[in-house]
């Protein structure tokens, strides 16, 4: 157990639908990062939150949004889902880059 | 634009021999580099890192080398063990500031250790 909890582990949904992925960071970590890993692709940075505030944005689609709540858990909302959104979505938290990120085990999203 | 590149999608190495995984980067602002290891159905786990002020960092069987002029880093695993079979990701950061540690990842290299 890495200390970063992601739910659900698997999600199957239809095109056009909306889903919410949840992440609880490791205790004491203020930063939460969301990454997407599509088939045979590396980890693509989506967005970072630090203590409730958006800190950095990557290649995140307008259909996607995220937030970090006062208890530091984060949610990634994906709407108007397309087949191409099928991927592994990872959440990571950190106390500082010199210690690296701690990743959750991911949510596998399948859009059918 | 892939700023961090791992040009070998896969690598097979005999058990006990040295595994060398390579990574190239294009962004000269990157000043901190990390390697992650990923098993199936798990999230990546941090393995080893190196700051741009160094050219080598060692941790047990794992050594990372950085060649800034060539914008190249490599991970050496000696000796390779069956448990090292995994996907290895190279990652880089441009400006490590507290509260802003965005990492750019490569596409990964699948390492298979042959018993």
Image (spheres, coloured by chain):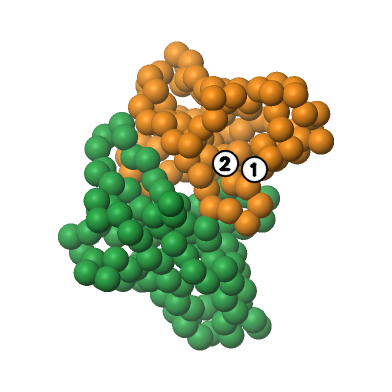
Q: Is residue B45 left or right of residue A108?
A: left
Return the x and y of residue A66 as percentages of the image width and height: 52, 22
Quadrant (top left, top right, bottom left, bottom right) of the C terminus of chain A: top right
What kind of element bears circle 2?
Answer: strand
Color of chain B here? green
Return the x and y of residue B27 as percentages of the image width and height: 30, 54
Q: Chain of mark 2?
A: A
Residue at 47% x, 20% y is A68
Residue at 39% x, 54% y is B3
Q: Residue B112, relative to residue A51: is it above or below?
A: below
Q: Residue A56, relative to residue B60: is it above or below?
A: above
Quadrant (top left, top right, bottom left, bottom right) of the N terminus of chain A: top right
Disc 1 to disc 2, C-alpha distance: 6 Å
Q: Residue A52, relative to residue A112: is it above or below?
A: above
Q: Chain of mark 1?
A: A
Q: Dot 2 surroundings within 10 Å: few (below 14), some, or many (20 or more)?
A: many
- Can residue B91 be seen here? The reply is no
Mark closer to the chain start, 1 or 2: 2
Q: Are marks 1 and 2 in contact (CB under 8 Å)?
A: yes
Color of chain A here? orange
Res. A36 mark = 2
Q: Is residue B106 left or right of residue A90?
A: left
Q: Is residue B41 left or right of residue A51?
A: right
> Splitting the image into 4 quarters, where does residue B102 fall?
top left
Q: Residue furthest left?
A: B53
**A84, A18: nearer the viewer:** A84
Q: Dot 1 surroundings within 10 Å: few (below 14), some, or many (20 or more)?
A: many
Residue at 64% x, 43% y is A88
- Can residue A18 be seen here? The reply is yes
Res. A88 mark = 1
């Amino acid at each position: 157990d890495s200390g970063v909890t992601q739910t659900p582990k698997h999600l199957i949904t239809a095109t056009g639908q909306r889903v919410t992925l949840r992440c609880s960071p490791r205790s004491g970590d203020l930063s939460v990062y969301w990454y997407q890993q599509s088939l045979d692709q590396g980890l693509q940075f989506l967005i970072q939150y630090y203590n409730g505030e958006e800190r950095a944005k990557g290649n995140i689609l307008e259909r996607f949004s995220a937030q970090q709540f006062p208890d530091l858990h984060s949610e990634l909302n994906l709407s108007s889902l397309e087949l191409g959104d099928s991927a592994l979505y990872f959440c990571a938290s950190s106390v500082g880059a010199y210690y690296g990120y701690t990743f959750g085990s991911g949510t596998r999203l399948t859009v059918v | 634009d892939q700023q961090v590149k791992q040009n070998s999608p896969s690598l097979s190495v005999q058990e006990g021999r040295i595994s060398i995984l390579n990574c190239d980067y294009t962004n000269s602002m990157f000043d901190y580099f990390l390697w992650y290891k990923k098993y199936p159905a798990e999230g990546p786990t941090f393995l080893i890192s190196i700051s741009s002020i160094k050219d080598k960092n060692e941790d047990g069987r794992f050594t990372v080398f950085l060649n800034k002029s060539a914008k190249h880093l490599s991970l050496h695993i000696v000796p390779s063990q069956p448990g090292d079979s995994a996907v290895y990701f190279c990652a880089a950061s441009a400006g490590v500031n507290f509260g802003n540690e965005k990492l750019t990842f490569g596409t990964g290299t699948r390492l298979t250790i042959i018993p």
